Image (spheres, rainbow, N blue to C red):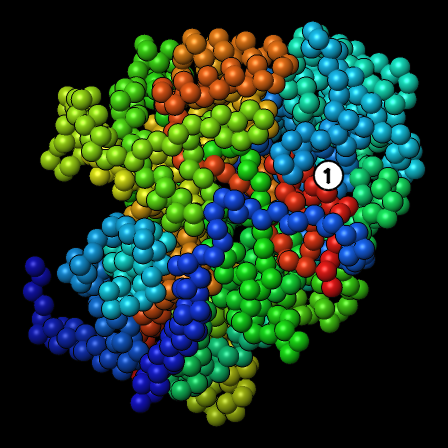
Amino acid sequence: MKTLKGLLMVVVLASLLLSACNQTQTATTVATKAPEVKPTEALPTPAPTVDPNAVQTGGTVIIGTPQEPSVLNPLLASSSIEDAIGSLIIEGLVQVDADGKYAAVLAEELPTVSDDGLVVTYKLRKGVKFSNGDPFTCADVQFTLDAILSDLSQVSTSGYSDIEKLECPDDYTVVLTYAEVYAPYLRLFSYILPRAAGDLAQLDSWDFNRNPIGTGPWMLKEWKAGDSMTLVKNPNYREAGKPYLDQLIVKILPSREVGMQALGNGEIHILWDLVEADFPALAQMKDKGVSYAGAVTGENELLLFNLADPAVDAPADPAANPHPILSDVRVREAIVLAIDKQLIVDTLLSGNVKVGTTVLPTGQFACPQPPTAYDVEKAKALLEEAGWKPGADGIREKDGKRMSLKITTTSGNKLREQTEQVLVEMLREVGIELVIENVPSDVLFAGWGSNGMRKHGAFDILLYTTGPGIDPDSHLYSNYHSDNIPTAENEGVGANYSRYINPDVDQWLDDAAVITNTEARRELYCKVAEQLNKDIPRAYLYERLLLSGYRVELQNLRVSPGPSDFTWGSQNWWLRK
Amino acid sequence: MKQLSPKKQDARRSLWQVFWHQFFKHRMAVVGAVTMVVIVILVVGAPLFTRYTPFKQDLRNRFDPPSSQHWMGTDDLGRDLWTRVLYGGRISLSVGLLSMAVAVVIGTVIGLVSGYFGGWVDAVFSRLTEIFLSVPRLFVLLVLTTFLRQAKIPGIQPGSFWPIALVIGALAWMSVARLVRGTTLAMREREFVQAARMIGATDGRILFRHILPNVSSPIIVAATLGLAGAIITESGLSYLGFGVQLPTPTWGNMLSNTQSQMLTAPWTAIFPGMMIFIVVIAINYLGDGLRDALDPHHVEK
Amino acid sequence: MADYLLRRFVQALFTLFVISIIIFALISSVPGGIMAAYEENPDMTQADRERIEAKYGLNKSVPERYLIWLGNLAKGDWGNSFVSKRPAIQEIADRLPNTLILMGVAFVVTLLIAIPLGVYSALRQYSFFDHVMTTIALAGQSLPVFWFGLLLIILFSVLLKQPNGAPLLPSSGMYTPGVERTFADLVRHLVLPVTMLALVSAAGYMRYMRSSMLEVIHQDYVRTARGKGLPEKTVIFRHALRNALIPIATLIGLDLPSLFGGALFTETIFAWPGIGRLYFDAALKTDYPVIMAVLMIFAALIILSMLLVDVVYTFLDPRISLS
């Protein structure tokens, strides 16, 4: 009798758990099956408020983030959330706006360039003050340049190190003279530090690092480590009457899942850093007053093929050490043909993104290409032609070699793990075996010195995201130019991990690097993009988005593909009561 | 084979009878044992109980709720969850058993030896135990599994669960060792040990014939907890992406991939979680029953 | 006694020294590290990377780095966080009180639940109460922690609401942001993480307490005491409980620092701004100075508590001598 009661307890507990889940499941299936959010055109950009009288001022907006910022000094920042939160306080001369274009912020207009491309002149806004009351002048630009080039800075110096001299003819004019043409000059000076920040030799111990002074709409009032940050209006902000809100609070959350709940409950107004995999959940929360804003980043989720032999350490020439399977372009083409990209997008991503077609999907340098076909029969034919014949278990073989490839991505990333498993099945259809072997992102992205697998070419296929972002110059050069194949000789410099060599591509890239004319550059980059789709060192699966969720009472939230992310235009935010 | 005298045979039979009598008295232990037998049959004979394979995807039917077609529903790639639970059990139970065995053997030997001999032996093993205890386990597990994944060990297939099970076991013996050492320490002062020593029994005999049986009950309790812990550790490792690699299912990696679906498709998280839950309860009851049945004090009662 | 303590102290220092070498070697052997963050940026030049590497001191060999770390530690300097640039010890000090609040409350609640229930279960072996308790204890132990935490959040922060529509209990953090900090607010935030910690660890303690008590009440001396006609209360509390607590003392001692390990999970799941969360973030960003400082302090705590266990042993069980 006693034991029966014990058993009863187990049953009761079990059925409690089961019934609890039954209730939720009926409610949710519908939403999962028929996501209401419509694709691509879809990134709803809230209509800018036309009638200024409609603006309701005051109130507090709470921003949720699963990652805590550690420093807000852009010279030391190492994560996107630090860039985004920092952008609430610190502004630059030119920044990337919500349309992915360069916009003058502290400059009155985009800088002018001399005909030879060597002299760049900025006109600065007059009457701008930092939050501590100091006026903003050319001297602050000089200070920022010095800071970037100083020993303790942790940012890239490309472009800045080409500046031969910086002159201040008056307080509001900056004249830069470059030693050589730096084509993506517009991306420089996206933040300005005040002279008052501190002594450059003491950069690491500046108060500024955790309590920055800027010209932006907000200033930091309080920072509770690990818990929250409170930002209040900058009294010296240049736009009268703005920001509309009184206060911003940045709240540290345990995870994105908890963040989604908090957003639905109204505990937070903005949730930073959603991913494409969150679309079904977002669709489901629509009736709870949750919406989302996004920006196309110009990056692709892609497959990176190793054209060289993975058994050889960092070979310089893939022709001398070819990959036993992937060096044949017919095999790579067959892999692309065997992948139903649209199915992946429609199912895993709820149809909310575009399939990947080109290395240059967006922005001023966009070079759209026709989507690749999904054609299993053609894929099989190509493999036959390349000499790979089906073996006993359906996996192809050639000269006793099994057509088995390893695929590696960052472990713990759910969407990537799903994609991998789908690819395993799709490629099995045509007789290719994929074996999943994932590693933590630090290991995957490790540098030359710490034996990074990409740098040393110890992989078959990698799955991750990369792309040119706003200006393709440095990305295309470092990822596809033969100078950038990491080897022992160059101490592992470069990101041409496919070890892809095409002299034409090298030439076009070299030519594009020394001109500043946008149209001429675009033509050259487009030739590169077309050639890449013929040579297939990488296969583009789908275009990535930068996504943030927000509550519909919050007006004017825009997402920029640049470092400011969802904080672009925060002075215009207001809450509908 | 040594011939036993009729009297000894009697004694042995009666001991077994007492054992079974005691065990069956603890009905939950019997329920636990039956549950485990059923689960082992289901898991070992997986293909007999499902018409799907654990890898067959159906992307157009992702997150189907439980139905007559898929009575546990489908997962994030439209695979039959029941099938994956069955096949996943194979790996989860194997990892659990193997790592528990490793932990108990190492822990018992170290605990016995250091508790019994004391002195410098105890000092050395205690330092070793301290070092193992003080190095954060999860962290070491992460580093070691990363290494094992890149190292090519001859005879072991890539993606095999053996290295993971061994590593979990090799880092879980400390609590068993401390427990056994503590009991042994108390035991070696007891009359029957003193008596055995007096009549000239060897250390080995005292340890394994006199002390070991008397420390077996904490070992059994610790082993059941260890088995449960190993299954849960595997799930934690898989959750962080360091466990058995997908698409091979384990209860751990099935469960841990579903956190964000807890609200939209709770069955994908509930069923693997329930399996761990049921198995661990069953094992623990089994352990309880064994302890009661093996405990000599109960016999006298 | 003083001799013994001194000897143990020296041993402890040696153990810590060995551990510091092991941990340092392990951390340094993980590929990637903080520099991996700079590999993805195509604008980073080789010179940039070398400059940053030198700034972190990562351009030196591992043994060299270890000696530098050890030398600084001898001067009381744990190094500065790679990420926030503040002293690692400062980062820890900022968060320690939060962890102590959470863990202290959870620990007390755990013991208050586990010991009485364990004893009572043992005394009423096989009763309905015993079965219910054993079932609950087993259930608690059988749940993967992160899964259980999520179930709690879904139940109390999503499904159950206050009359005004707000969630019944907050799912994360220590205080509600934007409003004044009150004790009541803190208590509300403590409920879920403490429940999770206490239920999971009380389950284990209760089982051990029950087994240990069962073990003891069948011992000769307890039966003798009973036989002598001592009142049941005296038998249980004076004789049985005291001896049954010995193995539990071991466990508690060993668990004191592992409570901080529990902090890792709990603080990560509930975004509690304590040391566990700090460690988790530092580990993600491979912030070596913070990782080393946290791990070494944990290790020292563990060793200290093990020493404490041995001392308590002699107090509880006079048959064991310290020599």
Task: Please state the horizontal and vertical placement of residue B74, each as a whole percent of the image.
Answer: 32, 59
Q: Quadrant of residue C71?
A: top right
Residue at 60% in and 74% down:
C161
Residue at 28% in and 72% down:
B32
Residue at 66% in and 49% down:
A47
Q: Quadrant of residue B2?
A: bottom left
Disc 1 chain ID: A
Is residue C89 visible in this depiction of the protein?
Answer: no
Q: Nearer the viewer, residue C93 or C144?
A: C144
Q: Is residue A470 above or below residue A313?
A: below
Q: What kind of residue is marked 1?
A: Ser
Q: Nearer the viewer, residue C5 or B283?
A: B283
Q: Is residue A240 above or below residue A467?
A: below
Task: Please state the horizontal and vertical placement of residue B290, each as a whole percent of the image.
Answer: 29, 71
Q: Give the residue at mark 1.
A: A87
Task: Please state the horizontal and vertical placement of residue C209, each as a whole percent of the image.
Answer: 48, 73
Q: Is residue C215 above or below residue A169?
A: below
Asked which secondary structure carries label 1, the reply is helix
Residue at 79% in and 11% down:
A165
Task: Please state the horizontal and vertical placement of residue C267, each as a whole percent of the image.
Answer: 60, 56
Is residue A407 visible in this depiction of the protein?
Answer: yes
Q: Is residue A298 left or right of residue C167?
A: left
